[in-house]
Image: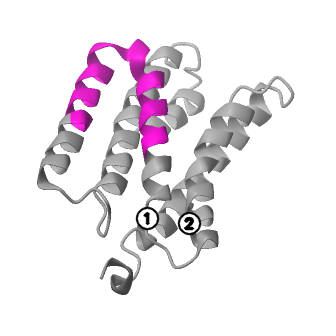
Amino acid sequence: MAAAIGVYRFGANQIMELARFHKDFSQIGGSIAMALVSAQLLLAEPSVNRARARRWVVLAAVIVSAIIAFKVPALTSGLFLTWLSAATIATALIPTRTIASRISLVAIVSIFSINLLLVRQSPHLGPDLSWHLFHTLVALWLLGMIYVFAHRGFDDEIAH
């Protein structure tokens, strides 16, 4: 939805008029989406996080985060970063055969952190290049997450 708003915003030359709405929608949606991605990783099987009570705590945290994001949009960046950190840690706990496999999974999740820190508003890239490179890296991260999710339940024999 945020992308659709952005396409309309620029295509209809409503750049300034829809800037705040686009930003708020992107941040609220991004925070909730990252909470859901993180929850899925935290609840992955096989995992150290199998306990039924743990599932309810994670799901409650996602719901509380969504409520906070809608009620206090100023907190969305903090929520997003908190959930991104949780996703990175949860990915580091995914069972793999080799440490190199684990590092590659964490590296994929970390693309978003690197994107936020070095690309999003880089004074060295300029606003246009920074914006386009940011969105390109978001798309690559999403493709990479397909790989991460495919490996989150890696090999039944590791769990046994």
Q: Which residues are magenta?
A: 61-86
Q: Amino acid at mark 2?
A: Arg
Could you tell me which residue is drawn at 19 percent across and 48 percent down? 54
Q: Main secondary structure of the magenta part?
A: helix
Q: Is 22 positioned to the left or the right of 40 in the image?
A: right
Magenta segment includes 158: no
Magenta segment includes 71: yes
Give the camera-side residue of 36 and 88: 88
Q: Is 64 positioned to the left or the right of 44 in the image?
A: left
Task: Characterize the local packing of mark 2: few (<14), some (14-19) or many (20 or more) Cα atoms within 10 angstroms.
Answer: some
Residue tagged 2: 102
Q: Is 40 positioned to the left or the right of 121 in the image?
A: left
Percent across and percent down for residue 145 are 49, 60
Percent across and percent down for residue 143 are 54, 62
158 shown above or below 90: below
Circle nearer the N terminus (1, 2): 1
Residue tagged 1: 94
Percent across and percent down for residue 154 are 41, 77
Could you tell me which residue is drawn at 24 percent across and 43 percent down? 58
Q: Are marks 1 and 2 in contact (CB under 8 Å)?
A: yes
Quarter occupied by the C terminus: bottom left
Q: Residue furthest bottom?
A: 157
